[in-house]
Image (cartoon, grey):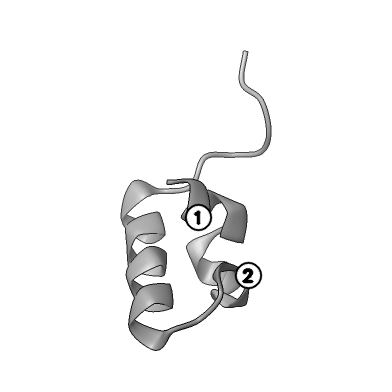
Amino acid sequence: MSHGGATVDDRRVLSGSVFVNRNGLRWRDALKDYGPHKTLYNR
């Protein structure tokens, strides 16, 4: 049994984390293409 929504591809999440850190953004300002901002932060 899974909780929450569909899983987000690990490579996409990693790219999103790099994007946020390189550009000095807040997690919630990440593009939606990278998945939910909470997923980026938690992973």
Q: Position of residue 11 (x, y in %)?
A: 31, 55
User: Is tag 2's residue or tag 1's residue first in the polypeptide sequence?
Assistant: 2
Looking at the rendered image, the quarter that the N terminus falls into is top right
Determine if residue 36 is in view: no
Residue at coordinates 32% horizontally, 70% vertically from top-left?
18
* Closest to the observer, 2 or 20: 20
* Left or right of residue 13: residue 33: right
- Label 2 with label 1: CB-CB less than 8 Å: no
Which disc number belongs to residue 5?
Answer: none
Q: How far is disc 2 from disc 1 in space, using C-alphas?
A: 9 Å
Observer-nearest of 5 and 29: 29
Residue that carries the numbered disc 2 in the rendered image: 28
The part of the image, by quadrant, that contains residue 16 is: bottom left
**Residue holding disc 1:** 41
Residue at 48% from the left image edge and 56% from the top image edge = 40
Structural crowding at the residue carrying mark 2, measured as other residues with C-alpha within 10 Å and reported as few (<14), some (14–19) or many (≥20): few
- Would residue 43 appear left or right of 32 to someone viewing this image? left
Q: Amino acid at mark 2?
A: Arg
Percent of width and height locating residue 21: 37, 75
Residue lying at the far bottom of the rendered structure: 23
Farthest-out residue, top: 1
For mark 2, give the secondary structure: helix
- Where residue 38 sits: x, y (%)? 60, 53
- Report the front residue among 30 and 33: 30
**Of helix, strand and loop, which one carries label 1?**
helix
Q: Is residue 21 visible?
A: yes
Taking the spot 40% from the left edge, 86% from the top edge, the residue there is 23
Amino acid of disc 1 = Tyr
- Residue visible at 55% across and 59% down in the picture: 35
| Crowd rating for badge 1 (residues with CA inside 10 Å; few <14, some 14–19, many 20+) | some
With respect to residue 39, does 30 lie above or below? below
